[in-house]
Amino acid sequence: MTHEAGHPSAETGREHRRFVPSATTNLPRWPASAPGIDPQGRGFVLMGLGPAAAGTLARWSADVTAAGHPCRQRLDASAPADDDDMLAWLDDALGAARVGWRLMLAGPAGDILMLAARARAAGMIEAEIRCHAVGQGPARLQCVHCKTLFRAAAGPGSHVACPGCGRMLVVHQHLSRRLAALVAFSVDAEVSA
């Protein structure tokens, strides 16, 4: 088995033999430092997940306050992005937002991708959302065979078992922005019978 650049397999410590890193991918490229607030924003919803997001949220809050804009903010040091209370808070904040408001998210990459997808589903457009990834955390994956959505400590090229159908999957470098999930397919999907 050849070893190409990529992430090690979660199951075997090896990479998938068919995984070839692509020069073109739709995976986000996270900047090293947090983006500033949008000067065109007229109000802001700020949300931070995990203790590493606290500094970013504090800077954003200070900038919004200095600009005199209305703001709703929440920092949760321990809850995952799919926590019911957190999602209810985000839904309420987005429901109260008006034209010109911006959503700023800081936290583990998998969590903020999921929250950004929820905001897009609520009607926000990409230009109204700014994200800063602070660490990776578990990725959200979707099995293409049974459509199960699940979270795992895996990246493109990794092997994981699907909790829905039990197949051994390889994680592909394609991200569904609607689902905030990486696509995963059977490791032997390309093997001829």
Image: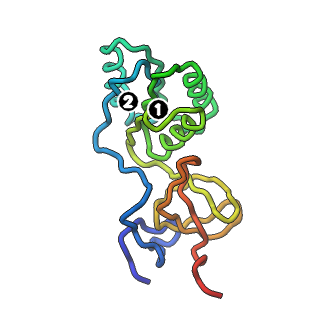
**Identity of the residue furthest to the bottom in this view:** 193
Q: Crowdedness of circle 1 by 10 Å Cα count: few (<14), some, many (20+)? A: some
Tally of marks:
2
Q: Is residue 37 above or below residue 16?
A: above
Which of these two is toward me, 150 or 173?
A: 173
**Residue holding disc 2:** 54
* SS for callout 2: helix
Which of these two is toward me, 170 or 104?
A: 104
**Identity of the residue furthest to the top in this view:** 68
Q: Is residue 105 visible?
A: no
Q: Crowdedness of circle 2 by 10 Å Cα count: few (<14), some, many (20+)? A: some
The residue under the point 65% across, 88% down is 193
Q: Is residue 173 above or below residue 132?
A: below
Q: In which quarter of the view is residue 160 placed? A: bottom right
How far across and how far down the image is residue 47, in percent? 46, 29
Q: Is residue 142 above or below residue 190?
A: above
Looking at the rendered image, the quarter that the N terminus falls into is: bottom left
Q: Is residue 147 above or below residue 102?
A: below
How far across and how far down the image is residue 120, in percent? 55, 37
The residue under the point 67% across, 60% down is 163
The residue under the point 43% across, 68% down is 8
Q: Are marks 2 and 1 in contact (CB under 8 Å)?
A: yes
Q: Give, as a three-letter code, the residue at label 1.
A: Ala
How far across and how far down the image is residue 16, in percent? 48, 74
Q: Say whether disc 2 or disc 1 marks the residue closer to the N-terminus.
A: 2
**Residue holding disc 1:** 77
Q: Give, as a three-letter code, the residue at label 2.
A: Ala
Marks 2 and 1 sit apart, C-alpha to C-alpha, by 8 Å
